[in-house]
Amino acid sequence: MSTLPPVSPAPLERKKITTLAFRQKKARGEKIAVLTAYDYPSALTLDRAGMDCILVGDSLGMVVLGYENTLPVTMDEMIHHCRAVARGAKSALLIGDMPFLSYQVSVEEAVRNAGRFLQQGGMDAVKLEGGRERLDVVRAIVGAGIPVMGHLGLTPQSVHQLGGFRPQGRTAASAKRLLEDALLLEQAGCFSIVLESVPARLAELVSRRLSIPTIGIGAGAGCDGQVLVFHDLLGLFDRFTPKFVKQYAHLNAAMRSAFDEYIADVRAGRFPAGEHTVEMAEEEWEEFVKLDKPKSVKRKV
Ligand code: KIV
């Protein structure tokens, strides 16, 4: 029988991490650890591990729902997964990712959709992609009392405009634009900004220029925190693995060997064994056998 490794015990109750704590961590030079999650058991484990922040990313479209990219993800799908995460994580800061077309059509719609993440999804904040073209939306959502995390660099919802999932800010002009966008988002009220797939030295400079924390993914060690996609970190998603991912486990291989073993056990009759089986007391069984005896049928003469 396979044995499971021991799991470290749950730490004592943690204080709720807030957007204010994010800023304080930056001021103290403490790095911020963020991971995505999309369901209850994962959120529970991340929270117990002491993760600072859980992002319910629209990456769920690719790693959980099997879409080609993040564009088909809907508000209802996001809310469904946010609710599950919120039931599992009580201390980490919870951020819901606004899906494609939930904030681009009008400012009013954007505020209403952002509100759903807090009201129905149990999130503490929202994230949205884009720079100068999103300032009105950011101001309006922040104005409604909803904290906003920005997202610059490789913004997957613009995959077709960017010509693929490719690094951004690698020319002097695009680096300058990215820095300007980051400063504009900070002025508009964002409490933090994700920098995805941008040169490390640019991300470091942006992080120094901002007073709000930057959270990097493929943006080097100079950011104020790091984020990875849950399935990438655990080696659960093997369709492709970006260069910037560090796999801390190889769960796809572990899952595959567990499934192979289970199938073989069932086919060979090794599972279930005695210890996996429910039994009943002998006298109850004997009584049952008596009850089950066919009654003799009296024939009419
Ligand atoms: O959707 C997502 O998971 C994200 C992170 C990769 C930052 O946006």
Image (spheres, rainbow, N blue to C red):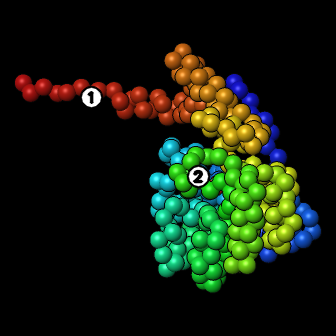
> Residue lying furthest bottom in this view?
143
Nearest to viewer (mark 2 / mark 1): 2
Instruction: Determine whether, in the image, residue 211 is placed left or right of residue 159.
Output: right
In which quadrant is the N terminus drawn? top right
User: Residue 81 location in percent, x, y?
Assistant: 55, 58
Tell me if the residue at label 2 has its CB under 8 Å from ligand 1.
no
Task: Tell me which corner region of the image, top left, top right, bottom left or bottom right, holds residue 191.
Answer: bottom right
Residue 131: x, y in percent? 65, 68
Residue 53, given in percent of the width and then of the height, sits at 74, 61
Residue placed farthest to the right in the image? 28
Q: Is residue 235 above or below residue 65?
A: above
The residue positioned 52% from the left and 70% from the top of the image is: 103
Name the residue tied to disc 2.
162
**Mark 2 crowd level (few <14, some 14–19, many ≥20, 10 Å Cα):** some
Which quadrant would the C terminus be assigned to in this image? top left
Which element carries disc 1, helix, strand or loop?
loop
Q: Secondary structure at mark 2?
A: helix
* Residue 150 place in picture, x, y as percent: 68, 67
Kind of residue at badge 1: Lys
Could you tell which of marks 2 and 1 lies nearer the N-terminus? 2
Q: Is residue 26 left or right of residue 301?
A: right
Classify 83 as above or below 266.
Answer: below
- Kind of residue at badge 2: Leu
Mark seen at residue 295: 1
Give whichever of 181, 48 is nearer the camera: 181
The disc label shown at residue 281, or none: none
